[in-house]
Amino acid sequence: MTRDEATAILRVVVRRALADGDPSNLTLHFDAAVLDRYRIAAGFSMIRTDTVGRLKKEGGWTLDLGISPDEALVHAFAGDLLRLPPAEREHWSAFAVTLPTSRMILQMRLAPGSCFDDGEVRSWL
């Protein structure tokens, strides 16, 4: 699949999530090192192809993952991550990464209404 094809599919997913008011099918990205814990722990199995994988806790939960082309990142759906036990959600959050993103917008989200000065205000031309 080309990058353009993947982008087209992502746009459909995002459009549906926004139209339905349901972000559970939006993806979150993580450093692939998040999986190291499960490679050495008893009771977990991991399988994969070139671009997707599955992490499973025996007798418990399952998490489907996407794998970036360079294998440095994995991504999962927000709704699937919310179904993990709290300790697992905490573990995953420690490995969250941003794609090219404004650091300032993330800080603004954490402190709504705060003033942030990162340059002159100007028109967006």
Image (spheres, rainbow, N blue to C red):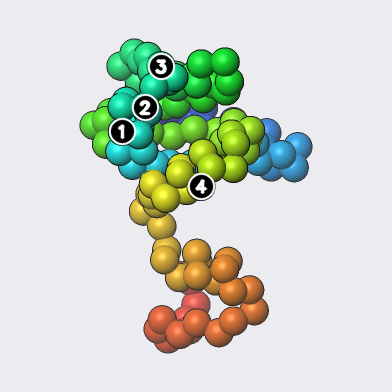
Above/below status of 115 relative to 109: below
Q: CA distance from mark 2 to mark 3?
A: 9 Å
Neighbour class for label 4 at 10 Å: few (<14), some, many (≥20)? few
Disc 3: which residue: 45
Q: Amino acid at mark 1?
A: Asp
Neighbour class for label 1 at 10 Å: few (<14), some, many (≥20)? few
Asked if the residue under mark 3 is in contact with the one under mark 2, i.e. CB atoms within 8 Å, the reply is no
Q: Describe the element under mark 3 as helix, strand or loop.
A: strand
Label whose residue precedes the other's in the sequence (3 or 1): 1
Left or right: 81 as drawn, with respect to 69: right
Residue 98's x, y, as percent?
40, 51
Answer yes or no: is residue 77 visible: yes
Of residue 51 and residue 39, the one placed in the foreground of this image is 39
Label whose residue precedes the other's in the sequence (1 or 2): 1
Label whose residue precedes the other's in the sequence (4 or 2): 2
Q: CA distance from mark 1 to mark 4?
A: 15 Å
Q: CA distance from mark 3 to mark 4?
A: 20 Å
Image point (58%, 20%), residue name: 60
Disc 1: which residue: 36
Residue 48's x, y, as percent?
36, 15
Above/below status of 20 relative to 101: above
Image point (64%, 79%), residue name: 113
Q: CA distance from mark 4 to mark 2?
A: 17 Å
Q: Amino acid at mark 2?
A: Ala
Above/below status of 81 relative to 6: below
Q: Describe the element under mark 2 as helix, strand or loop.
A: loop
Disc 4: which residue: 90
Residue 116's x, y, as percent?
50, 82
Q: Amino acid at mark 3?
A: Ser
Q: Describe the element under mark 1 as helix, strand or loop.
A: helix
Give residue 41's mark: 2
